[in-house]
């Protein structure tokens, strides 16, 4: 006699478990079937053991700073990882499922029709069926590979201990994470990647920063190298790779194949139920329903993103559509992920390159270095960068974050993006200090100001101010123009920088700001005298730098052979002024320029600053000559 259910789910991985708990939450009679124990790849060989290994490796890496000769017993490491796996499994065991109203059948299931399953000789009938058959490691047809004891993520955590040397084939998230973690445990790691860089789905600049970090830590990396042959030699595995037409061999004790995953689609009787599929995936529509009415598919077997959190989202969508009369579409516009290297690399939406391809140069890109975050500076060797891509209105198209806690920070971006909240609104959200997430507030403030500057009335005002529009024409805008003046003055702190630097032996063209001053302008109202070297150029340069370092609120932004650029930020309103020094060797003098970013409200601060800096520079020069 057949067992009857409302919902039958094949596969108890991340997607299947989510679907089962969702169905049970709707009080539906639910059965979850899997030939293995619940948890799937994520619990037993993916997310949980890999992140556990990464955590242990990070602790070892920190300890080695103070105990360089520290030796690690990887047998104990693997024991700890298996304990973590069991702890997580305890929350999704058959007993827990039963307490939640879910029947679990530890058996192999095949479809025999649109509503029936054969479960090792037992018949199960269900009103709706959800396929969550998962995926397995992708192993390419490399000559000799099947004849060597290669590892995958499904087998490496079953080892008693890790090999002393390891070749890792594939520089996607799994390969990169494992290469850093194993290397930090003292294993000699060689990473091989067919593409010309690691992490090809992430922002190239940030991925290259991780690549350099791995190299600095001792990982040997071969990019643009294709594996063509594997063989055993002297108890080790020899991998032959082809790079630019020439071949080389890599000999290590272990070989980890980390080239992605392939969908499990064969052996489930999909044909009997009318479910269409190919070698890559089970075919579904936007509601996660297959070509067979009433049968849904989710997770790695469907794609397009083989990520546990995407599988969870699909599981909820499919189950609700199977139960409720109103269908929801699966939304892939807000995809996010994190690669758990040290530092982490978080991703949301489009990269800058993808955004430019779709939207052209109308996009706005904001970047901020971790070096400018106080929390990051409390950790030695901390590197990182935030890159956020917006449309012309300030709405988020995508973001990439490299740095500590990137996986947590990208979640804020993901929330704003999914809810359609403009990035500029983050400027008014108070964050605790010091935290890494403070970087988003800094960028949010810039976006807020740029949003103001992009308003039509403000753009009109600024055109008139810069001489691109007759000033008299602003009168046509009446009160709106006056409002524009107020907004522009509010926006002064982050207006676009003037054309800075040196051109043809002179500081570049003087900006229109009325209160700006320069030693190279023909406008007598703006002219100030240059400073003498008072000795060699090298000493004059040191004197200028020393003088700038003595100023509160002044940051040196650039130092070149003949040029120094500093930024002064006012205490009260955070207005920004650019201060430039050009060392004119021919005249043996220092050309000076100080200009506010907008400047119509600076109350002559640039001239006051010149006078004060002149006194300080003269005092330092005199002291230097007499010492």
Image (cartoon, rainbow, N blue to C red):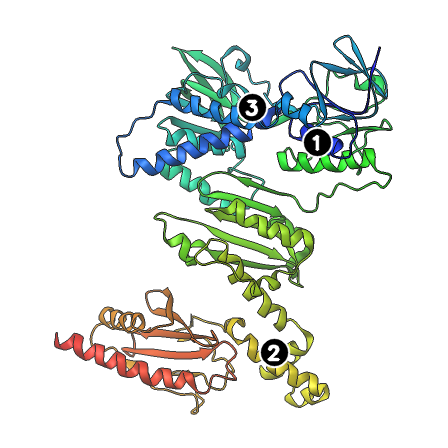
Quarter of the rendering occupied by the N terminus: top right
Query: Farthest top residue?
Result: 121
- At 65% from the left edge and 82% from the top edge, which residue is drawn? 483
Which quadrant of the structure image shows residue 592? bottom left
- At 62% from the left edge and 83% from the top edge, which residue is drawn? 464
Dot placed on the residue nearer the N-terminal end, 3 or 2: 3
Pick whichever, 244 or 369, lies toward us: 369
Circle 1 SS class: helix
- Per the image, the residue denoted by label 3 is 44
Q: Return the x and y of residue 140 as percentages of the image width and height.
A: 59, 21
- Per the image, the residue denoted by label 2 is 487
As displayed, is residue 202 above or below residue 612? Answer: above
Distance of label 2 from label 1 (alpha carbons): 52 Å
Local crowd at mark 2 within 10 Å, few (<14), some, or many (≥20)?
A: some
Total marks drawn?
Answer: 3
Pick whichever, 47 or 350, lies toward us: 47
Distance of label 3 from label 2 (alpha carbons): 57 Å
Residue 170 visible in the displayed image: no
- Per the image, the residue denoted by label 1 is 21
Local crowd at mark 1 within 10 Å, few (<14), some, or many (≥20)?
A: many
User: Which mark lies nearer to you, 3 or 2?
Assistant: 3
Circle 2 SS class: helix
Dot placed on the residue nearer the N-terminal end, 1 or 3: 1
Residue 269 visible in the displayed image: yes
């Amino acid at each position: 006699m057949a067992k009857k259910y409302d919902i039958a789910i094949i596969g108890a991985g991340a997607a299947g478990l989510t679907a089962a708990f969702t169905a049970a939450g709707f009080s539906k009679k639910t059965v979850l079937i899997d030939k293995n124990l619940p948890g799937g790849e994520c619990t037993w060989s993916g997310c949980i053991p890999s992140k556990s290994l990464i955590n242990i490796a990070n602790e070892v890496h920190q300890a080695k700073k103070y105990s360089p000769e520290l030796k690690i017993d990887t047998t104990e490491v693997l024991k700890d990882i298996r304990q973590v796996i069991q702890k997580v499994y305890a929350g999704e065991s058959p007993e827990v499922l039963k307490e939640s109203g879910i029947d679990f059948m530890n058996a192999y299931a095949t479809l025999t029709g649109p509503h029936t399953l054969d479960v090792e000789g037992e018949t199960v009938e269900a009103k709706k069926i959800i396929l969550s058959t998962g995926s397995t490691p992708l192993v390419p047809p490399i000559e000799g590979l099947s004849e060597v004891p290669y590892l995958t993520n499904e087998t490496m955590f079953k080892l008693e201990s890790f090999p002393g040397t390891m070749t890792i084939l594939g520089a996607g998230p799994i390969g990169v994470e494992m290469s850093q973690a194993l290397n930090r445990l003292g294993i000699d790691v060689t990473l091989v990647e067919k593409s010309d860089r690691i992490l090809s789905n992430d922002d190239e600049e940030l991925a290259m920063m991780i690549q350099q970090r791995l190299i600095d830590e001792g990982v040997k990396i071969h990019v643009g190298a294709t594996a063509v042959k594997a063989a055993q030699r002297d108890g080790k595995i020899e991998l032959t790779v082809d790079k630019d037409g020439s071949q080389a061999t890599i000999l290590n004790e272990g070989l980890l194949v980390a080239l992605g995953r392939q969908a499990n689609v064969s052996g489930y009787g999909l044909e009997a139920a009318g479910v269409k599929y190919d070698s890559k995936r089970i075919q579904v529509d936007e509601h996660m329903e297959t070509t067979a009415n009433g049968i849904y598919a989710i997770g790695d077997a469907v794609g397009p993103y083989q990520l546990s959190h995407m599988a969870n989202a699909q599981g909820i969508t499919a189950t609700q559509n199977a139960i409720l009369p109103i269908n929801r579409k699966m939304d892939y516009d807000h995809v996010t992920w994190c690669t758990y290297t040290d530092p982490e690399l978080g991703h949301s939406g489009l990269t800058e390159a993808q955004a430019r391809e779709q939207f052209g140069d109308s996009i706005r890109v904001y970047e901020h270095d971790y070096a400018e975050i106080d929390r990051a500076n409390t950790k030695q060797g901390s590197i990182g960068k935030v890159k956020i891509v917006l449309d012309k209105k300030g709405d988020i198209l995508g973001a990439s974050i490299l740095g500590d806690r990137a996986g947590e920070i990208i979640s804020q971006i993901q929330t704003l993006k999914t809810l359609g909240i403009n990035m500029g609104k983050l400027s008014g959200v108070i964050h605790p200090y010091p935290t890494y997430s403070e970087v988003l507030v800094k960028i949010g403030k810039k976006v807020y100001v740029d949003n103001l500057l992009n308003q039509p009335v403000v753009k009109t005002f600024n055109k008139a101010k810069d001489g691109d529009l007759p000033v008299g024409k602003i009168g046509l805008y009446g009160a709106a123009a006056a409002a524009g003046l107020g907004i522009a003055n509010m926006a002064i702190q982050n207006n676009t920088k003037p054309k800075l630097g040196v051109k043809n032996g002179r500081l570049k063209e003087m900006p229109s700001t009325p209160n700006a001053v320069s030693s190279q302008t023909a406008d007598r109202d703006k002219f100030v005298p240059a400073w003498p070297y008072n000795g060699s150029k090298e000493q004059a340069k040191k004197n200028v730098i020393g003088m700038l370092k003595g100023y509160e609120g002044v940051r040196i932004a650039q130092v070149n052979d003949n040029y120094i650029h500093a930024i002064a930020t006012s205490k009260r309103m955070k207005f920004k002024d650019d201060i430039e020094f050009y060392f004119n060797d021919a005249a043996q003098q220092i050309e000076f320029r100080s200009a506010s970013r907008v400047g119509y409200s600076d109350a002559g601060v640039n001239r006051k600053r010149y006078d004060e800096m002149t006194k300080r520079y003269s005092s330092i020069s005199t002291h230097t000559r007499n010492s």
